[in-house]
Amino acid sequence: MKDALPVFDALDVQHPNAWTELHFSNAFELLAATILSAQCTDARVNQVTPALFKKYPSPKKLAAADPAELETLIQPTGFFRMKTRSLIGMANAVVDRHGGQVPPDMDALVDLPGVGRKTANVVLGHALGLPGFPVDRHVLRVASRIGLISAKAAEDAVKAEKKLTTLLPPDRWTRASDTLILHGRRICKPKPLCERCAVRAHCAYYRKR
C-alpha cells in the first residue's frame, strides 16, 4: 500500500485513545505483565498483577521469589511454570546486568529471559516513551487483510514489523499497533464485522468480498 496514512487515521477515529489494556505503573510492571499475557487475555492478567506487584514490587524482590509461591500467584494466567521461570530469570537479569532498571534498548530487552520482540516493543512504546511497534496475531491478521503487508509477510512477525514501520513516522508506531490490535479484537475478528469497519474503503479483503 503506497499511502497507509488514511488507514491509520481512520483507525485512530474508530479506536480513539488506543493504548495497551494491561495495567501498569512503570516499565518493570509492564514487562512482567506482558510476559504473563502470552496465551492469556489482558483482562485475566490484570486480575493477577495487583497481588503480584504488591508482593514483588521491584526486580530485586521478584528475582528472590520462591518459585512455588510465584506459581500460585500467576496460575490463572496459564503456563505458570514456564512463566515463573521467565519472570524470575528476567528479574535476575535486570538486576545483574542493568542495575535493577529495565533497559531502554531493543537488543538489551530481547536478551532478557522470556522477552521477545513483541514484548520489548510493548515496553519501549508504552512505558519508556520510545518508538515500538508490537506485532501480535491481531496485527498480522488485520494488516494482511487490509493490504498493509503481504500474506507472506504476515507469516513472519519480524518481517511484518519491518514493513509496517516503513509506513509511518516512528512517533506513530505504538498508537498504530494499538489501533490494529483493538480493531482485531473488536471488528476484524477471525469472522470479521465488515459492516462496522471504518477502513472498508481501503481494505483489500473487503473489496474481494
Image: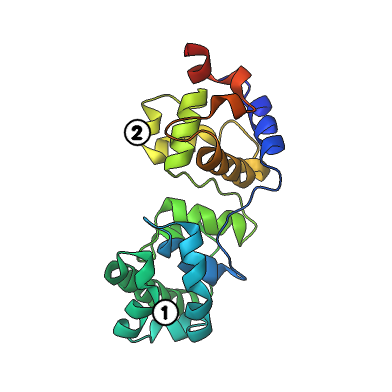
Quadrant of residue 25 within the rendered picture: bottom right
What amino acid is labelled 1 in the image? Asp
Near-viewer residue (195 or 108): 195
Q: Are marks 2 and 1 in contact (CB under 8 Å)?
A: no
Q: How many marks?
A: 2
- On the image, the x and y values in percent for residue 15 come to 66, 41
State the residue position of label 2: 155
Task: Report the colour scheme.
Answer: rainbow
Q: Residues within 10 Å of mark 1 (few under 14, many from 20)?
A: some
Near-viewer residue (93 or 178): 178
- On the image, the x and y values in percent for residue 41 come to 45, 56
Horizontal side, residue 160 vs residue 24: left or right: left
Q: Which mark is residue 96?
A: 1
Q: Is residue 102 visible?
A: no
Residue at image location 56% in from the left, 49% down from the top: 132
What amino acid is labelled 2 in the image? Glu
